Structures are given as structure tokens and as C-alpha cells.
Image (cartoon, grey):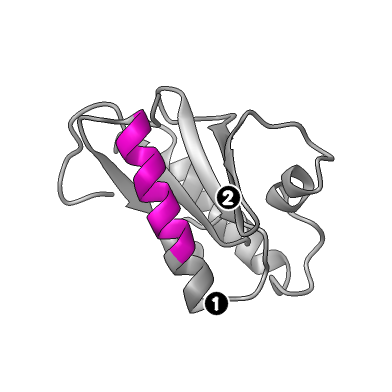
């Protein structure tokens, strides 16, 4: 199953949360994120894929349907790691959303990044509009 997102409902709240988180601290010195806690198994998750570089799990708060989120096991920005995440997300998206999907990486407060840990969203399960957002 895939995460479907819509432009209505919750969007303004997500923008507000992203800006609040961005104002709190430097992402490199901030306390552990929810993703850090999922990676350390402090918080349980329904894992759909794991390898030495990434973990993909069902979103606990999808926009509309069961969702997938994929995140790295490293905190630093590495081109090879992002490439691995995108390739893995594409494979999972093709398996979970055979009718098509979108990969999303939110960055910064204007991009609605509310968790400062490199991660990729797999969104699909219905026709997606364009432009996004």
C-alpha cells in the first residue's frame, strides 16, 4: 500500500510544524529525531525493507492510505547514500504502487521538512496532481 497525499487538509499544519522545528536547533546538534529512534529500535515500526544503508517502513501517520517512508542510517549528506535511497525507494514504490508513485524529499522549512534526518517519501495509490504542493 502507498501513501496518498492531497493538497487539502493538514498542509498548513505541516508547514507550521516544519517552521517550528527549523527554528529550534541546528539539525546536526539537535536531539535524536523520531527517525533516529526508529533506527535504534527505541520506537517500533512496520519495516518493509532494510539493508546496511537504509530502512523503509510504513508511515504511522500517512496522508490518506498506508504510507511508506524510507530513511538513511547516516546523518551526513552523502551523494551515494541519497542515490541508494532513491533506487531503493523506486524499487519499493514499483512493488507497492504498481499504478505509479512519486518520490518526495522535503528540505528546509519552506519544503515542510519537519524531521531533520535524510529520508524519502513514497507517495502513490491514486492519480497524483501536478504541480505538487
**Res. 4 visible in picture:** no
| Earlier residue among tags 2 and 1 | 2
Please rate how many residues cluster around mark 2, counting C-alpha atoms within 10 Å: few if below 14, some from 14 to 19, many from 20: some
Residue segment shown in magenta: 84-96
Q: Point out which mark residue 17 bears.
A: 2
Farthest residue in the front direction?
51
Q: Is residue 54 left or right of residue 130?
A: right
Name the residue nearer the viewer: 22 or 42. Answer: 42
Which residue matches tag 1?
Answer: 78
Residue 66 in percent (x, y) is at: 46, 24
Q: Is residue 93 above or below residue 78?
A: above
Please rate how many residues cluster around mark 1, counting C-alpha atoms within 10 Å: few if below 14, some from 14 to 19, many from 20: few
Q: Is residue 34 above or below residue 81?
A: above
Q: Is residue 67 magenta?
A: no
C-beta proximity under 8 Å, tags 2 and 1:
no
At 58% from the left and 53% from the top, the residue drawn is: 71
Amino acid at each position: 500500500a502507498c501513501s496518498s497525499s492531497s493538497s487539502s487538509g493538514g498542509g498548513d499544519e505541516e508547514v507550521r510544524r516544519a517552521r517550528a522545528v527549523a527554528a529550534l536547533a541546528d539539525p546536526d546538534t539537535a536531539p535524536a529525531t523520531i527517525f533516529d529512534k526508529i533506527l535504534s529500535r527505541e520506537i517500533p515500526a512496520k519495516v518493509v525493507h532494510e539493508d546496511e544503508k537504509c530502512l523503509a517502513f510504513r508511515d504511522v501517520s500517512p496522508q490518506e492510505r498506508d504510507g511508506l517512508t524510507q530513511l538513511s542510517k547516516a546523518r551526513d549528506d552523502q551523494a551515494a547514500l541519497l542515490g541508494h535511497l532513491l533506487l531503493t525507494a523506486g524499487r519499493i514504490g514499483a512493488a507497492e504502487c504498481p499504478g505509479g508513485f512519486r518520490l518526495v524529499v522535503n528540505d528546509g522549512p519552506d519544503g515542510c521538512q519537519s524531521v531533520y534526518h535524510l529520508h524519502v517519501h513514497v507517495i502513490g495509490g491514486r492519480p497524483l496532481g501536478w504541480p505538487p504542493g
